[in-house]
């Protein structure tokens, strides 16, 4: 049926052209078109030529110059306006957008951009985030501000500088500015600082492995990290301790069995031996002057307040023995002039005995008869 219509159209066109051979075909173009049935020509019967004011149900051609070129595997369009693109498409080469492009998800292998994040939305990295952040490439090595998962941190390869009068904070609390460390900082490993003023330290302290303060015992050691007193000074294996004893008295001395000396002018003036012997003065120098402004008691726990010197035992004056006893000595070396005072004087008796000749025990004679008879 379709071929019959085409044949009829071609036949009618041939008769019309013949009838109009001597006439201007443009004058009768309308009558010619009227003689061709609708949809009677197919593309197989047309080759080349220009169709003016072409239109169809889906295409309207108002162009006055070439805008679209179609060839094998290529459609070239000078200017394209599209309301909607559906399904996937691939762009090979460069694409430039002069307006605003809105996308739900943007995935790129390499992003080069001057970024302006609007609507207060942050830049988000999802899934694999290790090593993601900012990299500035060029001008030497790559500068970085990136996230590192091992260890969990934000890493910067460059110095971070804040303006004057600004600070670093943690959870809203200032921890560091250009002048101060925040009051919340309670622990640090400072190795070197400048001048300290008003330093308050809680806990143990170590100064150059020499001065140690034990915060648990409240003891300070110089040269020892285990002080045995409130203040211990250790040198050459000797520890001098200053502190208290038995919660009742203070003391100064050596903690181990070593002598103790009190020195002026680099000379020992008071020496206390490890066995307890005490020396006032120095044997290698001239005798020193010792003044006692008060009462002196020797081997007496409760000295007599009526006397200035209270001795519980024999004494010597200029090398001469003075002591009390019930009789003359019967043993021991004695010197001429030694005196033994009678411990129980009585009328008719003697005040004491005096050594008249040195020896062991020496020769003794009584003296100082008591009474007038």
Image (cartoon, rainbow, N blue to C red):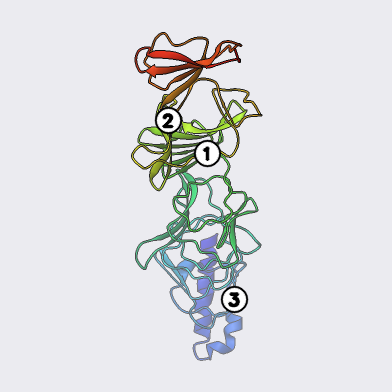
Earlier along the polypeptide chain: callout 3 or callout 1?
Answer: 3
Disc 1 element: loop
Q: Which residue is mark 3?
A: 35
Report the residue marked by disc 2.
Answer: 318
Seen from the viewer's position, the closer of residues 304 and 10 is: 304
Q: Which one is closest to the eye, mark 2 or mark 1?
A: 2
Q: Residue 80: horizontal and vertical position, in percent?
A: 53, 72
> Going 40% across and 40% down the picture, which residue do you hit?
287
Question: What is the secondary structure assignment of the residue under circle 3?
Answer: loop
Q: Nearer the viewer, residue 26 or 189?
A: 189
Which sits earlier in the primary sequence, circle 2 or circle 1?
1
Q: Is residue 137 above or below residue 328?
A: below
Q: Nearer the viewer, residue 171 or 189?
A: 189
User: Disc 2 or 3, which lies upstream in sequence?
Assistant: 3
Q: CA distance from mark 3 to mark 1?
A: 116 Å
Residue 64 percent location from the top left of the image: 53, 83
The residue wearing badge 1 is: 204
């Amino acid at each position: 049926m379709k071929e019959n219509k085409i044949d009829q159209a071609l036949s009618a066109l041939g008769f019309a052209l013949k009838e109009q051979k001597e006439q201007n075909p443009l004058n009768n173009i309308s009558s010619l078109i009227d003689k061709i049935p609708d949809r009677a020509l197919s593309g197989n019967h047309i080759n080349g030529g220009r169709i003016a004011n072409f239109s169809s149900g889906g295409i309207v051609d108002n162009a006055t110059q070439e805008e679209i070129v179609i060839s094998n595997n290529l459609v070239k369009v000078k200017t394209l306006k599209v309301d909607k693109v559906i399904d996937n498409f691939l762009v090979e080469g460069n694409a430039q957008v002069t307006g605003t492009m809105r996308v739900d998800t943007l995935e790129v292998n390499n992003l080069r951009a001057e970024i302006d994040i609007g609507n207060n939305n942050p830049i988000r990295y999802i899934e694999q985030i290790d090593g993601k952040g900012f990299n500035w490439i060029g001008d030497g090595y790559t500068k970085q501000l990136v996230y590192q998962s091992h260890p969990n941190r934000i890493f910067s390869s460059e110095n971070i500088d804040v303006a004057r009068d600004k600070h670093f904070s943690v959870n809203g609390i200032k921890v560091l500015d250009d002048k101060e460390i925040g009051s919340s900082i309670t622990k640090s490993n400072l190795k070197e600082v400048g001048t300290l003023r008003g330093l308050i330290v809680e806990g143990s302290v170590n100064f150059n492995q020499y001065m140690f303060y034990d915060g648990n015992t409240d003891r300070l050691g110089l040269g020892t990290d285990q002080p045995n007193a409130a203040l211990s000074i250790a040198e050459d294996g000797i520890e001098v301790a200053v502190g208290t004893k038995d919660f009742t008295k203070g003391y100064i001395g050596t903690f181990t069995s070593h002598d103790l000396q009190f020195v002026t002018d680099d000379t020992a003036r008071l020496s206390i031996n490890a066995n307890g012997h005490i020396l006032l003065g120095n044997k290698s120098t001239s005798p020193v002057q010792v003044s006692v402004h008060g009462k002196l008691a020797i081997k007496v726990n409760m000295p007599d307040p009526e006397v200035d010197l209270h001795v519980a035992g024999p004494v010597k004056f200029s090398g001469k023995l003075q002591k009390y006893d019930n009789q003359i000595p019967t043993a021991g070396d004695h010197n001429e002039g030694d005196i033994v005072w009678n411990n129980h004087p009585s009328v008719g008796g003697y005040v004491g005995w005096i050594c008249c000749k040195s020896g062991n025990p020496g020769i003794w004679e009584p003296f100082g008869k008591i009474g007038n008879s």
